[in-house]
Image (cartoon, coloured by chain):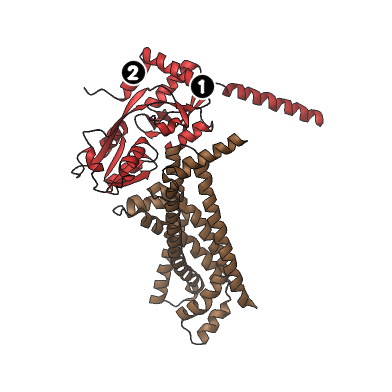
Chain colours: A red, B brown
Amino acid sequence: MKKILAVMLVLVFALSSVAFAENKGELHMGTNAHFPPYEYHEIVDGADTILGIDAEIAAAVCDYLGYTLVIDDMEFGAIISAVQTGKVDFGMAGMTVTDERKQSVNFSDTYATGIQVVIVKEGSPITTVDDLTADHNYAIGVQEATTGDLYCTWDVEDEGLGTVERYKTGADAVQALLTGKVDCVVIDNEPAKAFVAANEGLVILDTEYTIEDYAIAIALDNETLLNDINGALAALTADGTIPAIIAKYIPTED
Amino acid sequence: MSSALDNLKSQFILNFVEKDRWRYFVSGLGVTLRITLFAVLIGIVLGTLVAIVRSTGDKLLPGMRKGPGRIFLGIANGLCKIYLTVIRGTPVVIQLMISYYIIFASSRNGVLIAIIAFGINSGAYVAEIVRAGIMSVDNGQMEAGRSLGFTFVQTMAYIIIPQAFKNVLPSLANEFIVLLKETSVAGYVAVRDLTKAGDIVRGTTYSAFMPLIGVALVYLILVVFFSWLVGKLERRLRASDH
């Protein structure tokens, strides 16, 4: 009996060590896949897949470094915590570098530029970005913990010039705008275009709210991965891979 | 060891003290209590009414004479059954979003919508609790009340319901505690409750530990406090047993 047990134990250990060896080459990416065209869900060949600029760049980086990419979809506000606690190896979700975030994680070099814009209903009294800070007490919809949320909180809410309504996804914020719960939505330009295209009666203001640089978040103590990723980003930018990915999702208008 | 303590201290200051972030938690706590309290009131009123209809319907309908009374009770009983099935058969967060985006699409008052949604939700659970309470009161009580000249409503209000409530008070208190914690999903419709306060702070400081543990502690203290209060009430009510 004991012998059988021992043999079984050995087998279990052998099998699990094989399993671990296979997992060694995985890099987990934390993202919030409700942010087209940077990351979003789509059924590809019958299977749920996360597509987008970030997903493809991450795949290219992992490929370059010899890892297999695993994407974990979570709430945007949870990504930095997940990076800090090691639940994921890096976070990539159209994330802007801010001083407060830098205290918690390292950021890679910039791989894309984002623009925060304002979506309003057609015929809205809001016609320029300055209207938001003009003390009209507008309700601004944002996706919780995104830079749109942070900027509007600082510029509008903390100054007592209006309120910020924080939704779990950008789509929820746009839904709230459509039903008139908020007066406008501040969100990244690319998803904004997708939302405006999908919903009639919405327009994007001509002037942008802010311009920002997107980067990959990596745990503070993981200098090796930071350097590896920066190296990969530089190489992939130089050989045209990253510009090609961005151009594929964001056709240049001019 | 001291560096770990220093780290905790700086995390505490970053998450609660700096930029007056504790204010998010205080106002969030207020919103959570407001939603829970008003929702539980709606729930008890709605739940008791539904429970009376359901228990009366189950008891009287089979033996009732044909006529308007039977039709009315039959319809009311059917509606209550549908209400219980739908509300208990769907997740509260979905009900909340349906209320927010569809039913009350034109209202901007997220807290009020949350109160109504949680109240309607809680009503279904309270109804089943109170129904069990009513059924636990001996049939003879109703017969005695009626033969003393009380109307049906009077017997229910003065004799049956008080006894039923006493029997189900622990379950009702439990429902209150469950509801208190369930309101933590109100953040889905941009309501700034206690959980959302933690999320907002987490979103700006990017530290998970302090906001989450802080929020958890506040909920725990609330639940312990309410449990203690209910315990006292139960002892008071039991005093009349002797």
Q: How many marks?
A: 2
Subunit that carries the residue with mark 1: A
Sequence-wise, the earlier of marks 2 and 1 is 1
Residue B122 image position (x, y, % from top left): 46, 60
* Tag 1 residue: A223
Subunit that carries the residue with mark 2: A
Q: Residue at x 42, y 55 (%)?
A: B31
The answer to whether marks 2 and 1 mark residues whose Cβ atoms lie closer than 8 Å is no
Quadrant assignment, res B73: bottom left
Dot 2 crowding, Cα within 10 Å, few <14, some 14–19, many 20+: some
* Tag 2 residue: A244
Up/down of B205 relative to A227, above or below:
below
In front of the other: B9 or A181: B9
For the residues marked 2 and 1, what is the alpha-carbon distance in whole angstroms? 28 Å
Q: Which residue is drawn at 48% across and 18% down?
A: A228
Residue A82 image position (x, y, % from top left): 50, 34
Residue A164 image position (x, y, % from top left): 33, 45
Under circle 2, the secondary element is helix
Residue A139 image position (x, y, % from top left): 29, 47
Up/down of B131 relative to B142, above or below:
above
Residue extending farthest to the bottom is B148
Closer to the eye: label 2 or 1? 1
Q: In which quarter of the image is the C terminus of chain B?
A: bottom right
In front of the other: A106 or B110: A106
Under circle 1, the secondary element is helix
